[in-house]
Amino acid sequence: MADWFPSREWLESYRANLNEDDAYAAESDGWGVDFNGDFRFVLTRLPLEETALGDLPDELTADLYDRIDALEDDEFDRLRETATSAFEERLESGEGEADDSDRERFRRTLSGIALADVPDVAWPALEDQIRGDLDSLLAQLETYVVDDSRVHAHLELEDGVCRRAQLVEEPSAQDPGFELEAPYETWTDLLEGADVIESVMSNEMSLEGSVTRVIHYGDAAAAMGDVAGETDARYLF
């Protein structure tokens, strides 16, 4: 799977790159030794309500639409017959031309479903048509998004090594020494080269934990930001 951001795959690539980065290893020497150096990254305001399936990059959704177009008439009819009432309501109330085909109306309705609503609107026969990266990403959003629009990543950091990096379903199950929180857009700015320390000092990012200790390891924090920017990412939103 491609390293879409945010995703488990991107986070694992970031962990691997961090552990190969000489600057990070040198500047974070001693970090987490005799104190809890684990970090929780919190991405807030993921635009799940504002983003519909049709807004996602074409490379994610093209296969789904191609599969629907390739269905035989009887297969498409069975897909339609088992649709949820939530989908049928959207289909019947949708706008379109009078001479639109059933498949055109179906595709238009499908494209208009907000990501936040996919779990409630989708049904097994449709889910069978969703495969590859799109299937994985929708499953991850359903699993890891909490409080409607927040994702938490937990990084185990000790003495120059990132021992683990994972998205977490239950943030309360971890007890990191530090937490860095910001809206999704601010995290993408970081990936594009924004300075993490400056973002914290300007309150664009909220830091919980010892600010003094983080500033003392400022070069390590900068290296983490540099590695994030160097980790290949394709933005989901």
Image (cartoon, helix red, strand yellow):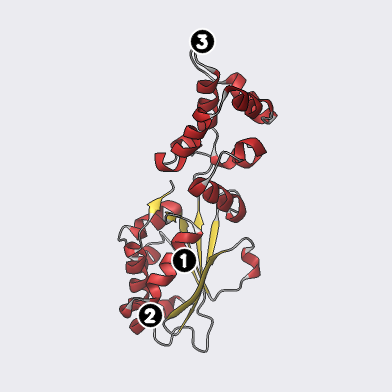
Relative to 35, 26 lies left or right: left
Q: Is residue 170 visible?
A: yes
Query: Is there CB contact under 8 Å for labels 1 and 2?
Result: no
Q: Amino acid at mark 3?
A: Ala
Circle 1 sits on which residue?
A: 12
Looking at the image, residue 231 lies above or below residue 37: above
First reached walking from the N terminus: tag 2 or tag 3: 3
Residue at (44, 40) in percent of width and height: 56
Circle 3 sits on which residue?
A: 98
Residue 60: x and y, percent?
45, 43
Q: Is residue 123 visible?
A: no
CA gap between label 1 and label 2 equals 23 Å
First reached walking from the N terminus: tag 1 or tag 2: 1
Residue 167: x and y, percent?
55, 62
Residue sitting at the far top: 98
Circle 2 sits on which residue?
A: 217
Residue at (51, 10) in percent of width and height: 98
Relative to 154, 57 lies left or right: left
Residue at (60, 40) in percent of width and height: 128
